Image (cartoon, rainbow, N blue to C red):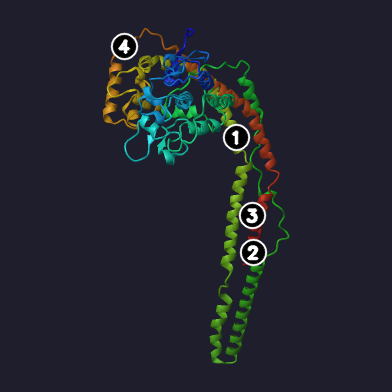
Amino acid sequence: MRKVVGAKLMHQLCTPGDRKTEFPDAHFRFLVRVALNFTRAVASIHNLGAVIGDINESGALIDQKGLVTIIDSDSFQYRSGGQLYRCLLGKAEYTPPDLQGQSLDKVDRTVDHDGFGLAVIIFEILFMGRHPFSGIYKGTGNQRTISEAIQEGRFAYSQRRSLTQMEPPPHVPVLTDIPMDMAAAFQKAFVSPALKVEARPTAAEWIPPLEKMEKSIIECKANPAHYFSGIAPSCPWCRLEAGYGTVLFVAHQPAGRTTFDLDYVVSKIEQIRSPGSAPDLTSMMPSVGNLKPSHAAKDFRGRVWARKAAGLAAAGLAMFLMFNRVGWGFFLLIPAGILFFGEVSGAAAIYRERSDAESVWKDSIENWNRDVGSGKFDDKKNGLLQTAASYRALPSDERNMLQTVEEKKRDLQVQKYLESQKLSKANIESIGDGRKMTLRSFGIETAWDINSHSVRAVPGFGPTLTGKLMDWRLSVESRFRFNPNIPTDPAEIANVRAAIAMRRSAMETELLKGVKDLETIRAELLAKRRNASQYERAYLALRQAEIDTALL
């Protein structure tokens, strides 16, 4: 084999902790390219008639350009002179369910067997070192180890969770964050043994969807260090970083703008005049001179006058009888009073209609003032001016952040030291490779990641195992020695400057776009003010109600 110079083991690329140290310039597009190159290398081995057999994350070297060299070829299975030389090795976390628990020195490996391990490797590269069978078991009985989950076909990221009874760890990417053909290939590779009716995707069959995925990658608008598949509904790395409070990709300070003129942009913003208060809605309503009392109001008024007339007639008759000394004429005054002064039914309904109309018209005025008033314009303009003030304060913010970094030098040295202590290299009782891989799938890779809360959240890790991990972290931390003479970590300074540069870039974009947005808002408000026809029905209903109640 040719000598490989400057390359690292593939597992150092899969896990964010190692990758940030060993591949500081690697972003997600680079990871997809490595997965593609590894797949092509496996396909070339299969084309030669060999089977890798012991396929795992330590079986390849990756250089800084993403070139892949597969190693450990002495364990490949191959045929020569009519004799088959088997692969005697295998790592359980990369062994397909149909070979789990078998004596591998007695098994003839196939390309389909390699297909399982290959799919696991591709998954780990694309999903930040998470193992596809490490998740949260929701069924009955004990939490499943990775090996047990493989045997039972419990693909933790499967879209058939009612069948697998597994859920992925929190905050991680899911199959909907990658192209559909990639998701389908993973489903096919990790299908339950009871449902397997066809071969797993071969290395050659993985190449087209990976090439397609590489072309679909876009840059995150919120974080330029993040790249992800354009099929994803949102940036999965922003979600994962927020959930775990960690950084997945090393941020590099973007080139600063040299043409941005804040004073010019602010002057353009200030020149855009406010559209002013909304015009009086009532003055925009049509004339109501042709409105007549409604039939209900006229009917009510007619019944009122009829009763009063009847009352007057009854009173007149009573007076006539009493004048002619008819004694019972006096008693006619009682019904006469009832007819004249009594209430006529229907008034309450007319007053209620006016009250409802007044309420609707009041809401209409409020909606009008909100929709076409200057509130939206003023809020946008004030927000832009506030952003401009924040932009001017960026140099001061950067100085304060750098001062904070300097003041926290000891804490940063502790963190850097603990991050350098990899769990994968630790010798901890009862914490073997399988459990280390489970911890990795839940974001625990280094001594820095270990705390009782995060470890207890990992399925299968109770008080005893948590205590062993905490003891290891304490023993590691006890070996730390603070050196005040060591300069502040340049990476932390770079992170501060990159963060400031990202904020500056975002503010410049907001301010430049804000000028056009402000002009658009003003034009839209002025256009809306020319048409208030949607409120005419409410206005006419109010005026009709006023005319009707005037008759009462």
Q: Earlier in the sequence, mark 3 or mark 2?
A: 3
Residue sitting at x 61%, y 50%:
364
Q: For the residue marked with disc 2, what is the amino acid? A: Asp
Residue 538 numbered mark, or none: 3
Q: Earlier in the sequence, mark 4 or mark 2?
A: 4
322 versus 217 height, above or below: below
State the image quarter where residue 148 is shown: top left
Where residue 41 appears, as percent x and y from the top left, is 52, 18
Residue sitting at x 67%, y 50%:
534
Q: Nearer the viewer, residue 252 or 191?
A: 191
**Residue 443 appears anywhere in the view:** no
- Disc 1 and disc 2: Cα gap in Å? 42 Å
Q: Which residue is mark 2?
A: 548
**Closer to viewer: mark 3 or mark 4:** 4
State the image quarter where residue 136 is shown: top left
Q: Residues within 10 Å of mark 4 (few under 14, many from 20)?
A: few
Q: Residues within 10 Å of mark 2 (few under 14, many from 20)?
A: many
Where residue 433 appears, as percent x and y from the top left, is 35, 23
Residue 55 numbered mark, or none: none
Q: Earlier in the sequence, mark 3 or mark 4?
A: 4
